[in-house]
Image (cartoon, rainbow, N blue to C red):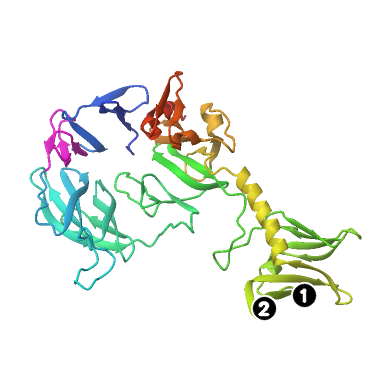
Amino acid sequence: MGDGRVLALCFSDRGMDSILVTENSRDWNPISVPAGFLPWSVDITGDRWLIQGWDSGTEDGRTQILFSDDQGAIWTEVVVDIGPVDGTAWVANAIVAGKLIVVVVQSDTWQPGIDPDTYDEVGYEPSVEHAYLFLSDGGPAELVAKFRGWGLAGYGASDGFRMIIGGSNGEQLLYSPDGREWSQTPIDVEVTDSARDEIWTADQAGGKFRNERFEGVYGPDQVLTLPDGIGWVVDLAVGPAGVAAVGGPEAPYDYSVDEPDEEITLPDIVVEKDGYELRYNQPEGGITLWDLNKGTAVYVFDAEAVQSEAPPEGVREIEGTRGFTTVEDSFTVVFDDPDTGAELVAFTHEEISAAFMEEDLAIQNAYDPYDFLVGWSRDGTGWAWQTLQEAFGLPERSKDDDSITEVELAVGHNFVIAKVQTYEFPPSLFEEDAEIAFSDGQTVSDSSPLAAMDGLFHPPRWFIARVD
């Protein structure tokens, strides 16, 4: 919850079974909700508790927002009239600060059967999305603001409300001290797929991690550097005790350059021809031409020389041709004798590419992006990492493993909780008339075996780590 407590939404075969909360990881107290209410969001950090979910007692399972001022003894619904909202509208989110509640209603003007991204000769226009903000002090919610775009995430704190919305102009941060008057400023920190060297502290929205809530503080200015050896973050949790994360391993190398100042990373590859070896990444980031007969280097080029636009002295690149047409992606690299200038050896594009492809294949066979690691840091700077096998006693993975283990983390005052569950996806699962064996020895034969997937989920286990 960000304040040292950990909350769990617990499911059974009946649906939502209970909401539990703990302060010490040992004693769990239930939070009662009305019968038939299936919550998907719970906020109990302030005096006014707020839950969002579906009313299973209605035919359409409409979204409900409920609040309680007596720790769940009595729940009252926040009434939101979305009738005046243009287009197709639905309740998307709600946040609370003190006694005030802000409800986010999302809408779009898309018309079924019409391409939402184009005009046509009939005069239909592209879909337009808006986020409508309603304010309630416990009574019926009142429309107070409208913004172009869609709501991504929002939280309330002692100094008011913060909401992030997305749109054609990028992401905007909305702020209001009272839920009625809102200011809007662009978010100038962006994390994209091509710049995944930054992670956000806590909940994930729009592919970005942001700090969920500490008193009066809300991201996205709180940024942590992606730890060494970690290529991507799967789950992240922040609390008073520190930061816990689940990450995928960094790819062994990347010899593409996306930014002008980015250093290239080369694999260790050797291409042999006519008594010479072209040795990549010798020295690091560079290339060496080695004479096998003499046992000496003919040329040694460092990383700077390799990344220069013009070939180094003694090296020529000849573009390939096919008939009378130049083939831009085909070339031959020619190395001349440094003393006489005569040609020593030439490597074709095909010969070099074949070596790179062979190395790529070997790395792809060895690299498992789902061989996750679990990490811990007190301050987001120094990290200690373990494999899931080391941390939770799981069996070692192989490259042919058809399972994946999901780990969810939560950080409290002086403890970390990890929920660990493994899912198996054998190839037979997707075959017609397949027979699936379960751990209890029973089998299920079904022309659509996906119906039996529940039997392939290992029971979840919870682990607790104490933090001194």
Specify the quadrant of the image occupied by residue 267.
bottom right
Q: Residue at x 44, y 18 (%)?
A: 440
Q: Quadrant of the N terminus?
A: top left
| Residue 259 sits in quarter | bottom right
* Secondary element at image label 1: loop
* 57 is within the stretch colored magenta: yes
Please indicate, yes or no, whether residue 460 appears anywhere in the rendered image. no
| Residue at 43% over, 35% down | 432
Position in image of residue 164 (x %, y %): 29, 55
For residue 369, above or below residue 123: above
* Residue located beneath label 2 in the image: 323
Q: Nearer the viewer, residue 186 or 331?
A: 331
Q: Amino acid at mark 1?
A: Glu
Q: Position of residue 210 (x, y in %)?
A: 37, 49
Callout 2: SS: loop
The segment highlighted magenta reads: 50-78
Q: Disc 2 residue type? A: Gly
| 293 up-or-down from 419: above or below | below
Tell me if 440 is positioned left or right of 92 in this view.
right
The picture places residue 137, in percent across and down from the top left corner, at 11, 45
- Label annotation for residue 313: 1
- Dot 2 or dot 1: first in sequence order is 1
